[in-house]
Image (tube, rainbow, N blue to C red):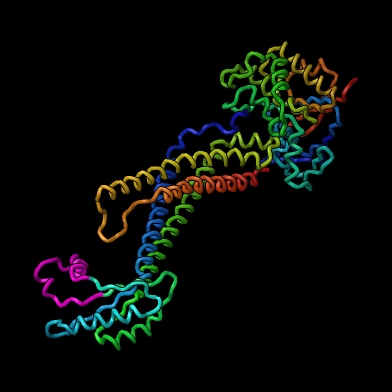
Amino acid sequence: MSARILPREAGAAPMDVVIAIMAFLAALALGASLIADRAAEGWRSGLAGHVTVQILPPATGAPGPALDAETASALAVLRATPGIAHAAPVSQADTEKLVEPWLGKGALVEDLPLPRLIDAEIVPGESLDVATLSQKLKAAAPDSALDDHAHWIARLKALSTTLIWSAYAVLALIAVATAATVAFATRAGLQAHHDIVTLLHQMGAQSGFIARAFERHYFLSVLGASLVGASIAAVLFIVARGLEFAGVEAVPFLPPVDLKPMELLWLVTVPFASGLIALATARLSVLAALRNIY
Amino acid sequence: MLRFENVSMRYGPGPEVLRDVTFRLEAGSFTFLTGPSGAGKTTLLKLMYLAEPPSRGLISLFGEELATLRRKAFPALRRRIGVVFQDFRLLDHLSAFDNVALPLRLAGAGDYEHDVEELLTWVGLGERMHAKPETLSGGEQQRVAIARAVVARPDLLLADEPTGNVDADIGERLIRLFGELNKLGTTVLIATHDRGLIERSKAREMRLVDGRLVELRAGRT
């Protein structure tokens, strides 16, 4: 096997540390985008297949048999509507559970005039004429209100899109920072190995031959450092997943900070992308420098 | 083979190191370049092995006018030149073997181990071919530098004081090696202070004084 044209570089540790940290941050950003995408998709699919009908209690006076009658009428309308697979009233106990995080539980909640709720499941792939259904429900149950969750779905979609694009922006910034770091290191390397580069050039080495020596050097160096950074991020995600299994909830209401095994594989792209960025940057830097030599 | 016409050279705004140098090296010739220290011998060699462009004048190498030649063609010309640098310029992290093999690697040669080993043995370094330059004596380093310059059988061999650090016996041997290469068709130019070497030879002598090529001795057969 041919010996290395460039000597192993002493004092390259600072660049390796910077690259490892950037790869760590890139892996975190990539993982966050995957979690955001999966969570938003889960929320969307959970809401998109259902509609909810509320039967509002009267503003004054106790909800009486009229509310039960309206609920029954609304149920009948829903069950007669094509595209509705299943409709069932939400029990009083389940309704109280829904407000429990905000109002707590006990006699106070039991005395509150909570609306009656009907949860209806849409046949997968079917689309509902929400306006017509709403009119029919109003006719049968004047105090009913139909919610197809369109508003929430739109907001969740906007939120997940924002999160994902923010993560991409962070990844792009890290890519630029990696390229800048390698360009700086390559220039320093060219100065450190000026004698070798000049000798090779004068012996008739093609620019590509010299560039290959540098690009191989920085590709391997950055690949190694970013593997360390991305691995630390992967370990963090695995630990977070273990904590979720152990019942530790990081932040209430937000999705768990864990990655599925297949999603963890995406983190492998970070060191390879970093290595390729380093390779291209080193090559371009060396070729630009060689153009200035006679 | 090589033609200089009114070539002058100055570094930056400094004085001219070479002035109106005009000469030809015919293919297969053997020439000594002499002159006192600071006369411009090393600069003249640098122009010959394409390390620097001249400030003025025309250089023609292997039938190509350098002034009009595309830069992409330079590496191929450089690979046809073997250079023995005065300061050897060996790569410290490579062994003697790998230093000598370098021109063959640059030329894309595949099977070069045998040629390199044979040449290193011939220059007396068969036992030290895997040693790093820093562990070699000055004379041994010089022999590695010479082996590296000749291993690819260059068309033009330029040597800057190639016998400066070796004893008389090895010096004679190296000059014989240059002579053998010359007989095989390599054009040889040696810059040297060694008057004994020149006197024993029948080769042509060019002399540089204060940047001018002032004295010529035609080669004798």
**Above or below, B2 relative to B150:** below
Give percent across and percent down for residue B132: 58, 21
In the image as oriented, which residue stretches furthest toward the right? B221
Residue A66 occupies quadrant: bottom left
Count every numbered label the image shows and give the total.
Answer: 0
Instruction: Looking at the picture, tell me which residue is in the foreground, A183 or A1.
Output: A1
Instruction: Looking at the picture, tell me which residue is in the foreground, A209 or A185.
Output: A209
In the image as oriented, which residue stretches furthest toward the bottom? A139
**Above or below, A52 relative to B88:** below
Instruction: Looking at the picture, tell me which residue is in the foreground, A282 or A151.
Output: A151
On the rendered image, what quadrant is the C terminus of chain A found in? top right
On the rendered image, what quadrant is the N terminus of chain A found in? top right
In the image as oriented, which residue stretches furthest toward the top? B169
Does A152 lie within the magenta span?
no
Q: Is residue B181 visible?
A: yes
Q: Give me the residue at 64% from left, 46% from top.
A: A292
Magenta: main secondary structure: helix
Provide the residue span drawn in magenta.
A91-117
Q: Is residue A154 visible?
A: no
Give percent across and percent down for residue A134: 34, 83
Give percent across and percent down for residue B93: 57, 27
Tell me if A96 is positioned left or right of A206 in this view.
Answer: left
Residue B12 occupies quadrant: top right
Tell me if B152 is positioned left or right of A85 in this view.
Answer: right
**Above or below, B139 relative to A21:** above
Q: Give me the residue at 74% from left, 36% from top.
A: B78
Give percent across and percent down for residue A123: 40, 71
Residue B206 occupies quadrant: top right
Instruction: Looking at the picture, tell me which residue is in the foreground, A156 or A220.
Output: A156
Q: Give me the residue at 31% from left, 84% from top.
A: A137
Does A110 lie within the magenta span?
yes
